[in-house]
Image: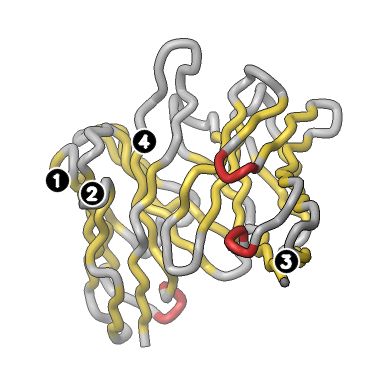
Amino acid sequence: AQSVTQLGSHVSVSEGALVLLRCNYSSSVPPYLFWYVQYPNQGLQLLLKYTSAATLVKGINGFEAEFKKSETSFHLTKPSAHMSDAAEYFCAVRSFNQAGTALIFGKGTTLSVSS
Amino acid sequence: DADVTQTPRNRITKTGKRIMLECSQTKGHDRMYWYRQDPGLGLRLIYYSFDVKDINKGEISDGYSVSRQAQAKFSLSLESAIPNQTALYFCATSDPGQGADPGANVLTFGAGSRLTVL
């Protein structure tokens, strides 16, 4: 079975500082991994995805994530935080329990950005 | 109009009442999903459907039922609502992916339906 664990339910950074949101996965097959962002009172939108191509994946709004098989990690980073990055972030892995199926989400990490 | 539309956006109801949350999409996707979001628990899958004739239970289907009325419509019902079903519910759609990236289905989410059961 596939699963993801997000380390830290809440991360606080100053504007301009590095953002690092941690995600570790468990999968018996090569995983498909995703990061989604949820802004207040909105649905989730895709930030980026890893699907076995390049291990460093670039997404929207300056975010990127690196797939590290040896560490079973897929951490999300952004070099310089902006106030507008304050949101909840979810790591997800595609479930292979059924053919072509749903995503399994982590519990989320809330990012706060202070000025 | 939004690609994935959920109605109602907010609903307050009482224990024991029947509630239906509706979802419609204009993406033309075959696959549709219902998730619920609870603080500190992330999103958990309730039901999913790969086409009109295909319905599958997710990890927390007890107390819920669904209906796939058409490719574009997927409804979630609570036959007898209880307070611990108070949550934010999301509908999502996906296609199976194409070309060298088969099955890397990206979900498109609706804006959510906030349900409060008193």
The amino acid beneath tag 2 is Phe
Q: Nearer the viewer, residue A40 or B35?
A: A40
Q: Earlier in the sequence, mark 1 or mark 4?
A: 1
- Where on the picture, by quarter, is residue B70? top left
Residue A26, image x, y percentages: 72, 37
Whole-Å distance between the Cαs marked 1 and 4?
17 Å
> Are the two marked residues, 1 and 4, in contact with CB atoms closer than 8 angstroms?
no
Read off the chain for label 3: A
The amino acid beneath tag 4 is Ser
- Residue farthest to the top, as pictured: B100
SS type, badge 3: strand
Q: Which residue is painted at 27% across and 46% down in the image?
A: B3
Q: Earlier in the sequence, mark 2 or mark 1?
A: 1
Same subunit, tags 3 and 4: no
SS type, badge 1: strand
Figure quadrant of the C terminus of chain A: bottom right
SS type, badge 4: strand
- Mark 4, Cα crowd under 10 Å, few <14 / some 14-19 / many 20+, is many
Q: Is residue B65 above or below residue A105?
A: below
Q: Nearer the viewer, residue B41 or B2?
A: B2
Can residue A43 be seen from the camera position used here?
yes
Identify the mark at residue B94; answer none if there is no mark.
Answer: 4
